[in-house]
Image (cartoon, rainbow, N blue to C red):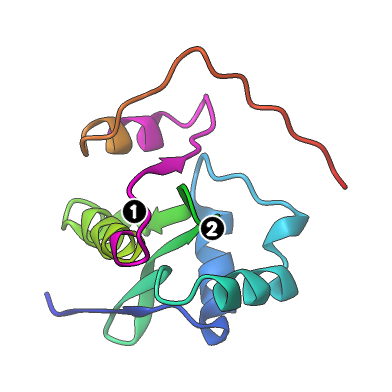
Amino acid sequence: MELNYREMTIGDYEAAFALWQQTEGMGISEADEKPNIAAYLARNPGLSFVCEHEGKLVGTILCGHDGRRGFIYHAAVRPDYRGHGIGRQLTQRSLEGLREAGVHKCHLFVLEDNQAGGRFWGGSGWSQRSGILLFSRNT
């Protein structure tokens, strides 16, 4: 299977958003509206990627950093393309971009009931943290 990996652009938004909506366990919010994603991509060049097969978007990863820590969001692979290393390849590309930017630690969030996401990240060398509470607030 010939897969094409490239940096994500805002031109990928509609296909990416459709994938995110169809991905079980993925949380979508107002922060995922097109203008917000455009701003995120502009602030974090070279860190977010897509995977295509025969011109069809089959995987995404959003990645950015605050200068100190990296963060991964919306890593998603279509169910019929899972098991081919797409998620690992997308993650590797983002982590390489973070290293090039001088960022050496990365975090990601998995919703507690997202069993598939927990299995993927746990099986990919990521450690589940304990003792941390996440607080959120709209501005």
* Quadrant in the picture for residue 20: bottom right
Q: How many marks?
A: 2
Q: Is residue 100 highlighted in magenta?
A: yes
Q: In the image, 27: left or right of 2?
A: right
Q: Is residue 79 magenta?
A: no
State how far apart marks 1 and 2 are (Cα): 12 Å
In the image, is residue 117 above or below residue 16?
above
Among numbered discs 1 and 2, the one appearing first in the sequence: 2
Q: Which residues are magenta?
A: 99-119
Decide if residue 109 is on the left or right side of residue 51: right
Q: Horizontally, is 86 left or right of 117 in the view?
A: left
Q: Is residue 8 left or right of residue 124?
A: right
Residue 20, numbered label: 2
Quadrant in the rendering for residue 125: top left
Q: Residue furthest right?
A: 139
Q: Looking at the image, which residue sits at the far top? A: 131
Q: Amino acid at mark 2?
A: Trp
Residue occupying the point 58% across, 72% down: 43
Quadrant position of the N terminus in the picture:
bottom left
- Towards the viewer: 88 or 99: 99
Instruction: Specify the quadrant of the image occupied by residue 121.
Output: top left
Specify the farthest residue to the left: 1
Q: Which residue is mark 1?
A: 79
Residue at 37% from the left image edge and 35% from the top image edge = 116
* Label 2, residues with CA under 10 Å away: few <14, some 14-19, many ≥20: many
Q: Is residue 37 above or below residue 53?
A: above
Residue plotted at (42% across, 54% down): 75
